[in-house]
Image (tube, helix red, strand yellow):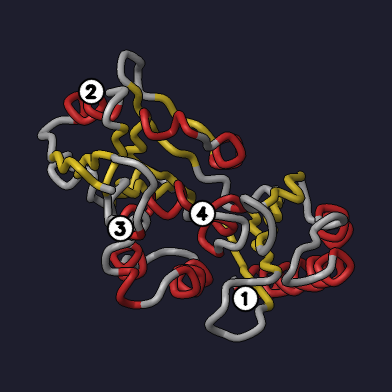
């Protein structure tokens, strides 16, 4: 139950509130997760007055403020085409109006199309904690380590590259369902290729990060060798991971040839 609502005017003030032992305090962006109800008594720290709602270019990277909504990101011109598809898969129109980029990453499980896509793109997160200098961490390093301590930290922005070819493919029981298997492939001009898989587990899996795309289907198959749950068998996910990763790669190759 939410027992306290706070709206700080500075990041430092927000960090002081988030660091309190009682009541346990959580950052509030769009509120799509906290509004579902929580066990025990908590306080929410509204981030709207902290200037974290901007989108800006920095070289070949897009800097996305923590409380930028998914709809604002969808409306931004210049993203890889399949990112728009991923955002629409992540949330319905109404939820996209309020769900924030940081909130979605904090709450994302392995079936999240957005987290899968951003893992493939090797995005970085900037975060702050009381008494420490701001730091940056790769999403792939941060996702598996999310835990109870996260409520003391404040994500301020997410940065991801735009000078990259990207494709996303998935299978689901219905178009409205989240993926049973999702494959996201990013390839840089140097040939570097990353494959991230979603659809299972607590967070997406990085299946490949190599100097080229050789063996991408094998990497996808190997990454899902134990990916079994009530939605699908490991054998099915292995097969689809290989198929979808190759489908993504063929689409990227076609884009490269066109350019």
Q: Residue 248: in sight, yes or no?
A: yes
Give whichever of 66, 246 is nearer the camera.
66
Q: Earlier in the sequence, mark 4 or mark 2?
A: 2
Q: Earlier in the sequence, mark 4 or mark 1?
A: 4
Q: CA distance from mark 4 to mark 1?
A: 34 Å
Q: CA distance from mark 4 to mark 2?
A: 26 Å
Q: Residue 214: in sight, yes or no?
A: no
Give the position of the C terminus as an image quadrant: bottom right
Which residue carries the number 1 mark? 258
Q: Residue at x 40, y 44 (%)?
A: 158
Label 4 with label 1: CB-CB less than 8 Å: no
Q: Earlier in the sequence, mark 3 or mark 4?
A: 3
Left or right: 11 as drawn, with respect to 153:
left
Q: Residue at x 38, y 54 (%)?
A: 101
Residue 97 coordinates in the image, percent (x, y): 27, 68
Q: Crowding at label 3, few (<14), some or many (≥20) Cα neighbours within 10 Å?
A: few
Report the residue that reaches farthest toward the front.
40
Left or right: 9 as drawn, with respect to 134:
left
Which residue carries the number 4 mark? 108
Q: Disc 2 vs disc 1: which is toward the camera?
A: 2
Give whichever of 169, 129 is nearer the camera.
129
- Badge 4 element: loop
Which residue carries the number 2 mark? 16
Residue 55 coordinates in the image, percent (x, y): 28, 52
Q: Earlier in the sequence, mark 3 or mark 2?
A: 2
What mark, if any, has residue 35 been given in the picture?
Answer: 3
Residue 187 coordinates in the image, percent (x, y): 65, 56
Q: Is residue 161 above or below residue 82?
A: above
* Among the 4 quarters of the image, the one containing residue 257: bottom right
Label 3 with label 2: CB-CB less than 8 Å: no
Residue 29 coordinates in the image, percent (x, y): 27, 50
């Amino acid at each position: 139950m939410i027992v306290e609502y706070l709206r700080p005017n500075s990041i430092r003030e927000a960090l002081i509130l988030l660091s309190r032992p009682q009541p346990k305090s959580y950052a509030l962006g769009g509120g799509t997760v906290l509004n579902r109800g929580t066990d025990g008594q908590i306080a929410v720290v509204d981030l709207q007055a902290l200037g974290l709602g901007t989108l800006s270019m920095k070289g070949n990277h897009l800097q996305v403020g923590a409380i930028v909504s998914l709809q604002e990101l969808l409306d931004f011109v210049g993203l890889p085409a399949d990112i728009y598809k991923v955002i629409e898969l992540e949330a319905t129109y109404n939820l996209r109006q309020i769900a924030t980029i940081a909130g979605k990453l904090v709450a994302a499980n392995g079936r999240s199309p957005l987290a899968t896509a951003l893992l493939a793109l090797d995005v970085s997160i900037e975060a702050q904690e009381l008494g420490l200098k701001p730091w940056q961490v790769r999403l792939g390093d941060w996702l598996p380590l999310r835990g109870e301590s996260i409520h003391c930290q404040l994500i301020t922005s997410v940065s991801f590259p735009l000078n990259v070819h990207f494709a996303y493919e998935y299978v689901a029981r219905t178009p409205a369902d989240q993926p049973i298997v999702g494959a996201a492939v990013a390839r840089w001009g140097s040939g570097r290729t990353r494959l991230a898989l979603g659809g299972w587990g607590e967070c997406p899996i990085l299946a490949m990060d190599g100097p080229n795309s050789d063996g991408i289907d094998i990497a996808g198959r190997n990454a899902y060798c134990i990916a079994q749950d009530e939605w699908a068998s490991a054998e099915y996910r292995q097969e689809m991971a290989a198929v979808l990763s190759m489908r993504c790669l063929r689409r990227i190759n076609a884009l490269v040839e066109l350019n």
